[in-house]
Image (tube, grey):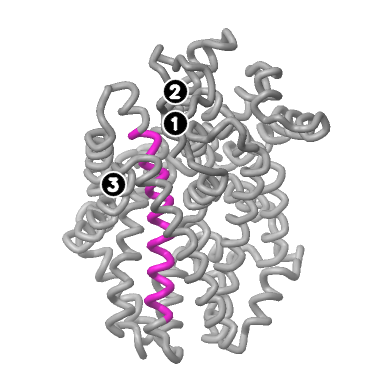
Amino acid sequence: MSTTPSGSAEGVMGASTKNRGHWSSRLAFILAATGSAVGLGNIWKFPYITGENGGGAFVLVYLVCIAAIGIPIMMAEVMIGRRGEHSPVNSLRQITRLDGLSRAWPIVGAVGVLAAFLILSFYSVIGGWAVSYVGTAATGQLAGKDADAIGAIFSGLVGDPGTLLLWHTVFMALVMVVVARGVSAGLEKAVSILMPALFVLLLVVVGYAMTSGHFSDAVAFLFEPDFSKLTTKGVLIALGHAFFTLSLGMAVMMAYGSYLPKGVSIARTSITVSIIDTVVALLAGLAIFPIVFANGLEPGAGPGLIFQTLPFAFGQMPMGSFFGTLFFILLIFAAWTSGISLLEPLVEWLEEQKGMNRIVSTLGAGIACWALGIASILSLNLWSDIHPLGMFAMFEGKTIFDLLDFLTANILLPLGGLLVAVFTGWFMSRQALENELNLPAAGFNLWYNTIRFLTPVAVAIVFIYNLV
């Protein structure tokens, strides 16, 4: 781990940054950022929303949105982190001080840190489902079961608060162990093992799917656009998912960017991370849809695709228990690397702001997140009839779990992304942007005009659509 100064020697609070940890290489940052981006959104959400919105045409729109909205905001967030060299809140405080801007701007970092904290609280619960399903698949409990029996397994899991608490605790412990070890021994070492393993597992499952006899159907479904199946709602969903799948608006890329050495190209790394993240999502589709088609199931099965539809398919196929187990291990790895990144912004802030050491700050943040997750667990069973904000039409019928999901995905994340675009495009010093991004004039102008005009409008549309 490099400890060479990578910016001004004095940080935002007047503390020296010369001994601040950094990623050891560009590859280390790419693996970490990709690990954050590749998560349940790729393996769980992307396949089912693609199925619900007609396949190829939706995928094409999604790819355009990644290029036009996702990459520019990722570059902006990484750049803020690297220029500030602190936690998201303090990086923004540092930049506003250097550029003589309003002291209100650090709230952008606070919105992201809050979003990451809230997301991890219920994300850990879903990660716990994946941990549970490894045992379920490995012990042959899926083999030969009909759809009702598979549904009963999932219903039994979410209806048992004690079991959910156990797996939620296991998942949060896995996340905390890595984060507590710091940048080099923790984050970097974990992703250097988990990400290659994730890719290998994904390719193995894709290879298995190729034997189903319906691989060509899956390829056609994903890559042959039929625009008659694409609706306005589908376009907006693609726009929103392109934004969320890259871990934008939740301060993660600012936190990871704060450890990025000055000599590394922000543009090249952001583009690389976005490409890898997209490839993983498409591979997930190629792994899942052949199995779905082979069993005569619906590709638009919704959120139950991974935990109900796919387990049924594995239960009907040769060696289904083995490959089902591999699939859920893959799902754990994807959720784990994302969980690590979601905890990091708050831990980094506690280290700086409260003077806590790494282990204490991780324990504090992790236990608080775990405790909030208990409310999500109970909302799936004992508290299922409790709707905290049900008096408002927007939140009618939403449990605590649903409410946390809605508030983060539909309000905090797009709000954070919109503020990042406005801050970098309209308020930060253009000279500072040029120095940090170090792009040719044509490349910089393309990014600058995109982040000033196209990106804010697109994110605002998603924001307003989700609220209305």
Q: Residues within 10 Å of mark 3 (few under 14, many from 20)?
A: many
Viewport quadrant of the C terminus: top right
Residue 13, horizontal then vertical, whole percent: 39, 14
Q: Measure the C-alpha gap from mark 1 to mark 2.
A: 7 Å
Q: Are marks 3 and 1 in contact (CB under 8 Å)?
A: no
The image shows residue 274, relative to residue 292, as above or below, that is above
Q: Amino acid at mark 2?
A: Lys
Q: Secondary structure at mark 2?
A: loop
Q: Secondary structure at mark 1?
A: loop
- Quarter of the rendering containing residue 113: top left
Q: Residue at x 59, y 45 (%)?
A: 243
Residue 138, horizontal then vertical, whole percent: 31, 80
Foreground tag (3 vs 1): 1
Q: Are marks 1 and 2 in contact (CB under 8 Å)?
A: yes
Q: Residues within 10 Å of mark 2 (few under 14, many from 20)?
A: some
Q: Residue at x 46, y 63 (%)?
A: 303
Q: Amino acid at mark 1?
A: Thr
Q: Amino acid at mark 3?
A: Met
Magenta portion: prevailing SS class:
helix
Q: Secondary structure at mark 3?
A: helix
Viewport quadrant of the N terminus: top left
Q: Which stretch is magenta?
A: 323-347
Nearest the eye: 359 or 101: 359
Q: Measure the C-alpha gap from mark 2 to mark 3.
A: 26 Å
Q: Residue at x 55, y 65 (%)?
A: 47
**Which residue is the site of mark 2?**
18
Q: Residue at x 40, y 56 (%)?
A: 335
- Residue 3, numbered label: 1
**Which residue is the site of mark 3?**
176
Residue 41 visible in the shown view: yes
**Side (left or right) of 144 relative to 460:** left
